[in-house]
Each structure stands twice: as structure tokens, then as C-alpha cells.
Image: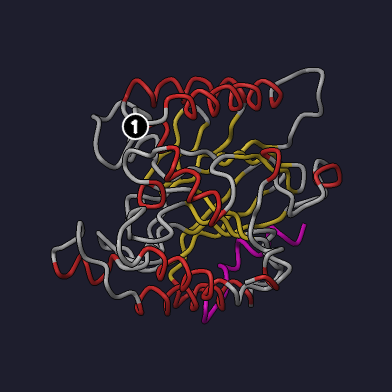
Amino acid sequence: MAEREDLFLRAKHRTFSGLTEDAEREWTGPFCFIQAADPQLGLMKAWRDGDCEGGGDEWAEEIELTKQAVEAVNQLRPRPRFIVLCGDLVHAMPDTPFREGQERDLKAALKGTDPSIPLVFVSGNHDLGNTPTPRTMEQYCSAWGNDYFSFWVGGVLCLVLNSQLFYDASACPQLMEAQETWLEEQLSRASSSTEPRPKHVLVFQHIPLYLKSPDEEDDYFNLQRVVRQNLLDRFKKAGVKAVFSGHYHRNAGGCHDGLDMVVSSAIGCQLGEDTHGLRVVVVTADSIIHRYHSLEQLSAEGMDEDLRKLLEV
């Protein structure tokens, strides 16, 4: 993978080294990016077998789907500025069988991504463990880059968060505190009157704040209400425009008080009626417009024409 190391985000000092930060702070016009989630190599067979805890010994299906996703993105015009994979890169939990093979094969499948399109990785519960530890966090960062960081692209500030620290940080409270301190600094700077204001602020994390409504009950697929409300209040105060997530393996979400909660279905295993797909996100001066496309549609037709026209301005 050495020849592709430039594509894999190795966020140093909690910033995205894949782009020149100073140049990217300036708004230069509309652009698009791709949000993907849950390739989760190994889950499809494990789900069919009813053995999601101990299964995952085959992942050829997910590899083919990932390659199809890469090929579909490569042929898009104009090219997306980046691809963000919102967690659960593989199914095997840390320190379990098949983990090393799944990570190796996912990197190989992603190797075909056009060199001009950086890959941004977000950590999920299967990447870190449901209760992450300092050891599992170190393993993830060694394989995929930092678990939280920021980057600028085209005048937009993007924050990548480790949502597992919001869900259960009982085994690594100091790491949770470190992310909290960093996040508060990022949000304060985003809304500061003394620093350049981003055109938009976007957040990427694996676990959604909510699936349909901010006041819904706690669930495996959302963040606890107390944590959720705290983040919603802070995001809104800082002017965050949208939060992009995965985890649910179905499309969901909603927009409340100007903050869009976007829950995208999976490249890999589907748990609902959606198809394997990707979300095309168009960023204009005023809005964030996004639409989920099946892999078949994106491969055959590209992004929808109305989205493409927004990029011609």
C-alpha cells in the first residue's frame, strides 16, 4: 500500500494533511463529495447465518461491492473533492479472527480510487469495539489514521468525530476528555468573530445523533438522549449545517432547527429495503444538498442531473 499512502488520511496534529489547509479555507464555488458507510467486510454472510457475534469468515461480496463503489466514483464528473467512509470499515472486532484479513482486503479494494480523490476514514463501533480501550484505539489509528480530526475543503470546515467515545468511554475516559476538549475548541473557533468564518461546518461520525427525531428513545442505533441533546445544542450554536453518519444500514434522518441529520445506508449489508449505495453531496454557497444513489444507478448514469447542474454555477 506504500504507493497509495497519499490517499489514506494520516491526520497529523488533528488536521487533514491531504489538502493544503490555508488554500482550502477560501470558498471557490460549488463542489461535491461522496459519503459512504459500513462496507463492514464479513457482515453479509454472518447476517445470513445468524452469527453476527462469531461469524464473518467470508467477505468476497463486500469486496466486490466496494470495488463497484470505487469504479462508480472514479467516473463521476466533476470529480468529488473527497470520499468519506463513515465507519464500520470491517466487521471483525479488534483482536478477533479475520480482522487482519478484512482490513488488508479493504485497503486493497480501495487502492483503485483515483489518486485525485482523497479518502477520509471515520471510526465505527466494529473498528474500535463497542467499548473502546486505549489498545483498540491505538490499533485503529495505526491502521487508518486518527480517530478524530478536522480538515478544510473549499471553504468548508469538516469535523470527523469518534462517536464511540460518546456511546461508551468507560474504558478510556481520558481519551473521551481529550476529544471533548478538542471538539469544544473547534466549535468555538468555527463561530468566532475573530477568525475566518467557514462557509459551512459539517460533522462526520459513525453513530447518528438520532434516526428520525431528536426526542426519540435511546436505541442501539442512536446516541443516548442526554449526550444527543448536548451535541445538538453545541452544534447548532457553532453553526453546524449537517451531521453525516452510518451505522443503521438503512437511510434515515431528518432536519430540525436548521441542522440536517443524515443517516446513510451501507455499501455492504442492508438491514432494510435500501440498496447498496453511496450518497452524493453537493455543497453550494447557501446549501448542502444530498441524495442517496444505488451503486447500479451511479455506475450506469452518474449523479442525478439536477445535482450536476448545481455544480455548473
The one nearer the camera, 220 or 143, is 143
Render colour scheme? secondary structure
Residue 238 pos. (x, y %): 61, 23
Q: Quadrant of the N terminus?
A: bottom right
Residue at the far right in the pictured view? 23
Residue found at x 31% / y 28%: 224
**In the image, is residue 130 above or below residue 61?**
above
Q: Quadrant of the C terminus?
A: bottom right
The one nearer the camera, 243 or 121, is 121
Kindly indicate the quadrant of the structure image that contains residue 273.
bottom left
Kindly indicate the quadrant of the structure image that contains residue 268.
bottom left
Kindly indicate the quadrant of the structure image that contains residue 64.
bottom left
Residue found at x 70% / y 59%: 81
Q: Which residues are magenta?
A: 299-313
Residue 130 pos. (x, y %): 31, 42
Across the whole image, how many numbered discs are drawn on residues?
1
Instruction: Look at the magenta stretch and give its main secondary structure.
Output: helix
Residue 213 pos. (x, y %): 33, 33
Secondary structure, mark 1, is: loop
Residue found at x 38% / y 39%: 132
Residue at the far left in the pictured view? 50
Instruction: Name the amino acid type tagged 1.
Output: Asp
Residue 270 lies left or right of residue 88; in this view the side is: left
Residue 267 pos. (x, y %): 41, 66
The one nearer the camera, 159 or 95, is 95
**In the image, is residue 238 above or below residue 211?**
above
**In the image, is residue 174 above or below residue 93?**
above
Q: Which residue is mark 1?
A: 168
**In the image, is residue 9 above or below residue 158?**
below
Rate crowding at label 1 as few (under 14), some (14 to 19) or many (20 or more) other CA atoms within 10 Å.
some
Residue 202 lies left or right of residue 130; in this view the side is: right
